[in-house]
Amino acid sequence: MSAPLLAVENVGRRFGGFVALDGVTAQFEPNKVTSIIGPNGAGKSTFFNVLSGVLTPSTGSIRFKGQNLTGTRQHKFVHLGIARSYQITNIFPELSAHENVRVAAQAARSRYNIWRNRSHFPELGERADAALDSVGLGGKHNETAKFLAHGQQRALEIAIALVSDPEVLLLDEPTAGMGPEETKDMVALLEKLARDRTILLVEHKMKMILGLSDRILVLHHGRLIADGSPRDIQADPDVRRVYLGQNDGYA
Amino acid sequence: MERDMTVKSIPLAATSSGARKATDLAAALTNWRVLLSIAALCLLPWVLPSKALAVNVLVYGVLAMGYNLLFGYTGLLSFGHAAFFGAGAYVTGIAIGQFGVPWYGAVLLGVIGGGLLALAIGALSIRTRGIYFSMVTLALAQLVYHVALQASSWTGGENGLRGFTVAKIDIAGFSINFLDPVSKYYVLMVFAALALWFVSRILNSPFGAAIEAIRENETRARTCGYDVERTKLISFVLSGLICALAGTMSALHLAFVPLDVLHYQTSGMIVMMTLLGGASSFFGPFVGALAFLLMEDVFSLWTSHWQIIVGSIFILFVLFLPKGIWGTFLARVVR
């Protein structure tokens, strides 16, 4: 087992009296795909929000490459190497697909400069082009983002996250709302990305999860109830009871 | 105006070459926006019925343009921009009238004063969002209004600030008669040109891309690695600087600062001008200022309740032409 890239230690988050996440401890190794599953309200989104700095944990700590990230402001996460996508498509609707990705790339290079032109950094445009091509949006560079098809918008959001060349990619239901064809394209894309990146995935499509994941974490009522290979998870009696057994629809 | 002629001379057939020409035209309008705007504004005094109206278009156009940087391009609806306009005007007037500062120093002080006030109000308001942001800016601007009202030994209180007439402007050995309306217009035009260049500079820059990203989707911009609060604050201050410049222009023009410059009606008027002309279009604020001031001139001849008519037209615009006059024109003609 190689050294963990990302580690959470006893991480919890409460909203008033409601405990959304309750003492989760886990390590994530480089270049593996880990899926986080659990029934609705299990704390998956809260877990992602804590891992990406959207929420500060109420308890516990997050370490990334040995550095403590607890309490770090959200916009710094992507500069450190943790990028994410959202469950509900989160793009810049009025901008072109290219500008969506270019402005994301620009955040690492120039954020406050008013004395240069945007075109002064041609490498950002080139990186945006490459990211769009890699997610299969090669012919759509000049399309306004809001006019793209749903699946293309999801791919665009992944290009936005990818252009920062993150070591860890957090993907919150990348196939949400997609039909079978679009899902197949997305799975192929994720398989390609998984070769040299650490991916954390929240998903409901069980077949996809079992095929893609090196490891699965199961959350239930904010607690981590199982952590293992897809095979172990399928055989785990607790998981079968709280998740698979009650929710055949997901399987 | 010159710009319109350029547009009409291009055939607008729906062929692919026509579409490409329209794209070229859009690119040309963007690339040359500063010079085209300056050219259009230089013609203004000779097209409009009075020179005074032309000067007002200049002053309020710069004001609305400064506001548009925050509202149209960063997506923040401030209801307190009268404060920066007023600060620029008062600081300039006080510097000249009470400290004998030469006009150029007074303009500089006015702009800096407005910028510092924007930094203070921005720092206090930027962390709130939506309607709360609007309300905090409104409340803080009202605070500034009441300070100006009370500090009457400095500001003249309700009577406004007088006694700082600039009669001539000396630049590089030339002496320009500032009481002559045409000379005055073109002196103020230099300030407007600087503001146009500065705003265009900002919009072309990486920072301009960052504020547009924040306007489009604040969450996504933050996730991409932009410090949203800091970026908004910088935009707020830049916007305040330009509005303060408009204030100093107004003070030099009128040789008088009425307390009304700080009134919330001024803040409302700025919003209306920007929306009438077209928020997030470069030249729109000037078109909006012109439309508003023309309506005021015409309708106030008919009735003292001219604001009812202007208000109704404004509502119609918000409902049916949300891109404003200039924005709609650009969208229709230059696609």
Image (cartoon, rainbow, N blue to C red):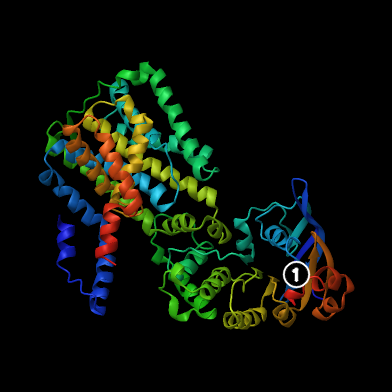
In the rendered view, does B33 fall on the left or right side of A180? left
Chain letter of disc 1 in the image: A
Residue at 76% x, 72% y is A29
Quarter-of-image position of residue A35? bottom right
Image position of A242 (left or right of A176): right
- Relative horizontal placement of residue B189, taking residue B82 as reference (left or right): left
Quick one: label 1, few (<14), some, or many (20+) residues within 10 Å?
A: many
Numbered marks: total? 1
Q: Of helix, strand and loop, which one carries label 1?
A: strand
Identify the residue at image location x=34%, y=53%: B322
Q: Residue furthest right?
A: A237
B43 w.r.t. B177: above or below? below
Q: Is residue A235 visible?
A: yes
Residue B85 visible in the current orientation:
no
Quadrant of the drawing holding the N terminus of chain B? bottom left
Residue matched to label 1: A37
Nearer to the camera, A192 or A41 = A41
Task: Measuring from the top left, give residue B269's x and y in whole percent.
Answer: 32, 38
Image point (19%, 64%), residue name:
B7
Rendering coords of residue B45 (x, y %): 13, 43
Instruction: Return the x and y of residue B254 as percentages of the image width and height.
Output: 22, 29
Q: Residue at x 20, y 31 (%)?
A: B303
Which quadrant of the figure contains the C terminus of chain B? bottom left
Above or below, comparing residue A223 to residue B253 in the picture:
below
Task: Using the rendered view, name the quadrant where residue A27 is placed.
Answer: bottom right
Left or right of B75 in this view: B313: left
Front in this rendered view, residue A117 or B145: B145
Name the residue type under label 1.
Ile
Q: Quadrant of residue B245?
A: top left
Percent x, y for residue A228?
83, 74
